[in-house]
Amino acid sequence: MDKMVPYPSGAIVPERDVDKRPVLETHHLGIDFGGLTAVDEFSLTVGKTEIAGLIGPNGAGKTTVFNLITNVYQPTRGTIMLNGKSTAGKNTSQVNRMGIARTFQNIRLFSNMSVLDNVKVGLHNSIKEGFFASVTHLLGYKKAEKIADARALELLDFFSMADLAEETAGSLPYGAQRRLEIVRALATNPSIILLDEPAAGMNPSETAELMENIRRIRDTFNIAVMLIEHDMNLVMNICEGICVLDHGKIIAKGTPDEIKSNPKVIEAYLGKKKEKEADGNA
Amino acid sequence: MTLISNLINGISLGSVYAIIALGYTMVYGIAKMLNFAQGDVIMVGAYISYICTTSLGVPALISILISMAVCTILGIMIEGLAYRPLRKASSLAVLITAIGVSYFLQNAALIIWGSTPRAFTSVVPFKSISLFDGQLTITPESLVTIAACVVIMVFLTLFTKKGKMGKAMRAVSEDKDAALLMGINTNRTISMTFAIGSALAAIAGVLLCSAYPVLIPTTGSMPGIKAFTAAVFGGIGSIPGAMIGGILLGIIEIFGRAYISTQLSDAIVFSVLIIVLLVKPTGLLGKKITEKV
Amino acid sequence: MSIASKYKGLSKYARTNIKTYGLVIILFAVLYPLSNAGLVSYSITGQLVPICTYIVMAISLNLTVGILGELSLGHAGFMSIGAFTGAILSASLQDKVGSDPVILLLAIIAGGILAGIAGCLIGIPVLRLSGDYLAIVTLAFGEIIKNIINCLYVGIDSKGLHINMKDAASLGMKGGRIILNGPQGAVGITKIASFTAGFILILFTLFIVINLIYSRSGRAITAIRDNRIAAESVGISITKYKLIAFITSAALAGMAGALYALNFSAVAAEKFNFNTSILILVFVVLGGMGNIFGTIIATALLYMLPELLRDVGDFRMLIYAILLIAVMLLTNSSKAKLILENAKLKLRSIFRKNNDGEVGSNG
């Protein structure tokens, strides 16, 4: 572990000035798609080193919430505050530079590029290399690339992926692709990372490793994690706060124990089944 | 009066563009490819009709039917030989192949018919109509072209809305794989689309050359590009869009030529296109596509 | 260590450099003395500079199409801007600057700058579009440029440059001479381009493009091509990097255009039409998207192909078209791919059997 640079890293990651505010706040967030309300009245705060879970039945609007927070969709209503600053009017790329990173439900890697280059794309905004350095490979190019390589390898090593650095990203096994997406997101030096179904398609041992990794991310990088997940075991085990979404609205917020015993949540998950049975009988 | 006469000329030229654009847009909607050879099918259509009337002495109307038949077969052959094997290839590969087909048709025409321009005789047997003591002259070609365009438009709309084949076409353009699972023969549907597009190109060729009677192997190139522009202008994939796009493009071209500059008319047409696309990135009637994240 | 294994051990950047620069330098080293000694037929010597310019055009278009992943159908438009800028500049400097290479250099730089500015002006609004819509706008742009230059009259006399869009007579010149004569294009150009200049321009283009690909900016551009949404999510400004790729590509095309124009005594705007844009696109696609080495080979071969087919007369372009379709079908159809794959496997198994046999007999 001596290769790991402890946070804050001396290489690239600057010491972040985090005050006592929550890292992410949303107020009455909502979006309509052609008259259809997909998400409504979504108000949530995530603490600066909290692991938060966003759960709910399929089609509840969880990914839409992520797309709203990252401004992939511009919200119809409501505000989003990151470290006390509004993200209104910013595009996805600017929102990332403000400190929100994410992964995707259906993996979106740069599949033709090497694993190392994927991470270096994540490091893009912390590499000091202008256009002229790029085209001449002079003017600080060598130094910038050297630092970027070192930092990328360091991040990969954190997930025991340093030996895969030269592989093509698209050729990695599924689990490794999911991990690489997390590494790439972390490389952007975020205050909060949003993970969209990080355990999807993983076997129990991989899921256990992932849980460990999520805790390590929070502890090492000192950032908040917000995740969408269907694996209740994972959610109940690592999340400190959980938010339950159904039909685009928050139906419960609280600690894992509170959520487990909330009748509304049970209804949202199990009530569906009764309805379906009723339909079948009719 | 010149305003009205220009307007009629514009709509007439636009109708030709619209007929070609309909072919482009249908093929694009279904096969998701830009069939660059469409313009050259126009040229082939015009040549066939020319040969029929001048060398074989066939009546004009029958020559159009023959020309449509030949172009239909040509369209089906092009699709089957050149495009069908590439159904799963990248769109760029298909585009380059289409360009290859376009070169092929042009050069085959050059070898068969030579590079000497042929003076096309109009297929419309009527005399020009003179109104307001000769102040306004309307050529019969423009009236026939406009009428043909309207008829084709109505026919295609009914065909895609009501007919079984038309429904299959719409299904394939929505989702090729789902259509296949529903028992639709996608290959046959795509062939059919090319057949219709090519038959339309034949009509367009004859009408175009009746109005502008110079026939050379590259006759179809520029109208082909313009019609393609018209299809995008109206929103590619949309039948009414192709119609509106074509007619507007024709009017802009004729008006630009008459009131701004003869030499700059193409620049004006393309500038308008750029402006429209910047304001409405999917064309006038195109559907907005949002990428799912 | 053998040379082959040493080569394999190098980084991809180093390998690309060795391969592409090596190819260009070898070709030059072979062709230059041959053409000087008059051992190459005249039809080929006359094509050396155009081939160089088309190689530069194809490499620069590959930056837009292969690396950025956006289809451009108006690349000849930028070439055109460079060509006429170069022609006008060289005509104006003819009497002031004594050295032809200096004039050529200045003309190429000016052509690049003006085409780059045009790329920027067209790119800022247009790069918001993508796919077929971007393609059609670039096509439209190419046609507009052609159309405008077709109406442009430029002349020079003792008072300096005269520009006009009506006709040559209304330039109102006293003596002097006409540089740009409407549809006839640039006339009376002093031919100052040379094969060596073309060779140097190719090296320069390779330097810019290959370095760009293997850099921070290049990674950003490739990332946008591979997955725009993911690129945005890691904080890459889409517009900025699309624009960088587009402007670089346009500027290089402008330089090629200037070199091209100064190789002929007259060049018309019609030369840089849609068909030329398409021709360059064909080079890029057959050479391989994003593959610079392949692009150079494809351009050289395909450019010479009609020359080599000259014996078959009228049929040469027909054969060219058939070859183009055949190559596309062979390299892209799923059936052909399957057949090729099977053939490869079979060959390999035969090869392996033979090897096994040898081992057996040795043992």
Image: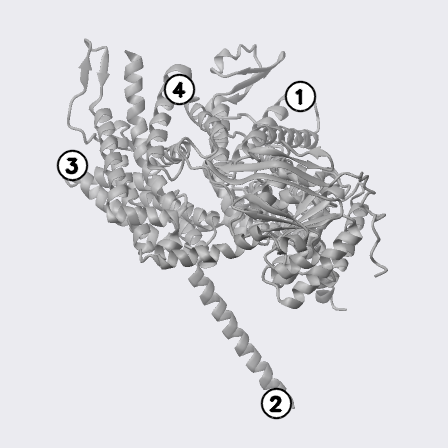
Q: Chain of mark 1?
A: C
Query: Dot 1 corresponds to which residue?
Result: C95
Using residue B22 as the reference point, say whether residue A251 is left or right of it: right
Using residue A210 as the reference point, say whether residue A145 is left or right of it: right
Labels 1 and 4 touching (C-beta < 8 A): no
In percent of width and height, residue C350 lies at 53, 78
Task: Evaluate whether label 3 is on the same chain as label 4.
Answer: yes
- Mark 4 crowdedness (10 Å alpha carbons): few <14, some 14-19, many ≥20: some
Query: Dot 4 corresponds to which residue?
Result: B256
In percent of width and height, residue C138 lies at 50, 34
Instruction: Report the Cα–Cα distance between label 2 and label 1.
Output: 80 Å
Amino acid carrying mark 2 in the image: Ser
Amino acid carrying mark 3 in the image: Leu
Query: Dot 3 corresponds to which residue?
Result: B61
Query: Dot 2 corresponds to which residue?
Result: C361
Labels 2 and 4 touching (C-beta < 8 A): no
In this view of the protein, can residue B116 be seen by the observer?
no
Instruction: Report the Cα–Cα distance between label 3 and label 4.
Output: 33 Å
Amino acid carrying mark 1 in the image: Asp
**Nearer the viewer's eye, disc 1 or disc 4?**
4
Labels 2 and 3 touching (C-beta < 8 A): no
Using residue B167 as the reference point, say whether residue A106 is left or right of it: right
Q: Chain of mark 3?
A: B
Labels 1 and 3 touching (C-beta < 8 A): no
Point out the image quarter for the N terminus of chain A.
Answer: bottom right
In percent of width and height, residue B89 lies at 46, 54
